[in-house]
Image (cartoon, rainbow, N blue to C red):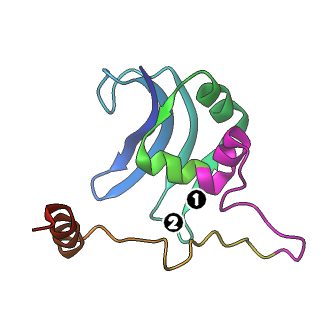
Amino acid sequence: MVKIRLMRTGKKKRASYRVVVANSASPRDGRIIESIGHYQPRSDPSEIVIDNERAVYWLQRGAQPSQPVRKLLDISGAWGEFSGHPGVASVTEEGAPEAEVAPAATRRRATPAASVEDGEDESGS
């Protein structure tokens, strides 16, 4: 299986990452198929550079992004191009970013108390 994931580069305690396409069996910093961008979280603001055209190409061919890369693709707009839904990078006519917030009634936090409450409903004693 092909994955889109982060490859760590940089000095100790000065991490920067490359966004790469690699076989899921290869090590984190091992053999890659293609490098499609980079991410530098230590700069202010964080620098995210992703080749959206190549990212969409690999997503269309079944590459699975890791969770951190999925968020980076959403920010860069590549995930929106792939899925057809506008992401964080979409902008309204006024130039302000659109907010994609679920109503409070539909959001649930995964907490131990919530799972205990769910367990009580299922027992029904």
Query: Would you say residue 72 sits in the magenta stretch?
Result: no
Query: Would you say residue 77 sits in the magenta stretch?
Result: yes
SS class of the residue under badge 2?
Answer: loop
SS class of the residue under badge 1?
Answer: strand
On screen, 16 above or below 91?
Answer: above
- Name the quadrant of the C terminus: bottom left
Question: What residue range appears in magenta?
Answer: 74-95
Which residue is at a point 69% across and 51% down the rendered structure image? 77
Query: Marks 1 and 2: CB-CB under 8 Å?
Result: yes
Q: Amino acid at mark 1?
A: Glu
Residue at which label 1 appears: 47
Q: Amino acid at mark 2?
A: Ser
Residue at which label 2 appears: 43
Q: Position of residue 58 (x, y in %)?
A: 60, 26
Q: Position of residue 49 (x, y in %)?
A: 63, 49
- Name the quadrant of the N terminus: top left
Which sits in the foreground, 8 or 96? Answer: 96
Which residue is at a point 63% across and 34% down the rendered structure image? 55
